[in-house]
Amino acid sequence: MSITIKTGADIDGMRLAGRLAGEVLDYLTPFVKPGVTTEELDKLAHDYMVNVQGCIPAPLNYAPGGHKPYPKSICASVNHQICHGIPNDRPLKNGDIVNLDITTIKDGWHGDSSRMFIAGEGSIAAKRLCKITYEAMWHGIAKVKPGARLGDIGHAIQTFVENQGFSVVREYCGHGIGRGFHEEPQVLHYGRPGTLEEIKPGMIFTIEPMVNAGKRDIKALGDGWTIVTKDHSLSAQWEHTILVTETGYEVLTLSAGSPPLPDFMLADKTASA
Ligand code: MF3
Ligand code: CO
Ligand code: CO
């Protein structure tokens, strides 16, 4: 397989799938409070996707090579869990941070987005990690335009994160997306400017940095999916699905409830949306 270029109706399909993923996150937002379980959030999201949006939740039974089928409809990664946390029956506690990662399939097209949430009142450290990770994602997005290279995205994210004293997870990355959940190319969240694949109009890929408050090392739990920080430090992640346009980019997973862009993006002129 190689990188697919999306045109016309493909892009319309991806716009819809993307917006719907964002709208699942909007829908879940008021439910993320101390006392709720991630299994309850999974059920809410599943029913909303299937019954209201007419979507298929892409994670459910997803079984890429070497993995057992993923058992739930969303990923919910709490505190030191980096990604692929499996929803369970433990209630969130005041101050917990949780990443909810939603992937819709609508008319065969995938939309993939995740946000951080804080149950109740978070610590200053937790709030700072979530904010820096959000800004890191946008530093990556800001690099997207024809003629730039994937290494420009990774470099922007890595330098920003490391300057804040945090670390970037290396083992998981963004990805091409379309009819497939995970397509080429891989979008690394670290790297060197001017390296790797040239960015071209019609490419669609995710940018989804995972940022640890401590060291970057990871550990896989025995459930076959959950990835945690080896040093048990907090970890955060944000994700958008991005279309490369003729002049820059369009964020496909924005929705009415998306958080405002960071201040440094407000002057950005490359966005075509
Ligand atoms: N949504 C994740 C991503 O951003 C992938 C989750 S795979 C699952 O790529 F099976 F764990 F859901
Ligand atoms: Co993704
Ligand atoms: Co995702």
Image (spheres, grey):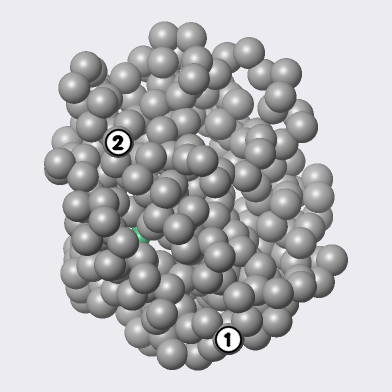
- Give the x, y percent position of residue 4: 23, 27
- Image-based side of 167 in relation to 253, left or right: right
Q: Residue at x 17, y 36 (%)?
A: 1
- Where on the picture, by quarter, is residue 106? top left
Q: Residue at x 43, y 39 (%)?
A: 253
- Mark 2 residue crowding within 10 angstroms, few (<14) / some (14–19) / many (20+): some
Which element carries disc 1, helix, strand or loop? loop
Of the image marks 1 and 2, the number of the one nearer the N terminus: 2
Q: Residue at x 66, y 51 (%)?
A: 133
In front here: 192 or 182? 182
Q: State how far apart marks 1 and 2 are (Cα).
A: 33 Å
Which residue, as the protein is rendered here, is positioned at the far front?
52
In the displayed structure, 173 sits above or below 100; it is above
Which residue, as the protein is rendered here, is positioned at the far bottom?
90
Note whether residue 152 is visible.
yes
- Mark 1 residue crowding within 10 angstroms, few (<14) / some (14–19) / many (20+): some
- Image-based side of 89 in relation to 105, left or right: right
- Where on the picture, by quarter, is residue 165? bottom right
Which element carries disc 2, helix, strand or loop? helix
- Image-based side of 244 in relation to 95, left or right: left
Label for residue 198? none
Residue receiving disc 1: 35
- Give the x, y percent position of residue 242: 43, 32
Q: Amino acid at mark 2?
A: Leu
In the displayed structure, 62 sits above or below 105; it is below
In the displayed structure, 103 sits above or below 241; it is below
In the displayed structure, 168 sits above or below 158; it is below
- Where on the picture, by quarter, is residue 125? bottom right
Label for residue 16? 2
Q: Residue at x 23, y 67 (%)?
A: 60
Q: Amino acid at mark 1?
A: Gly
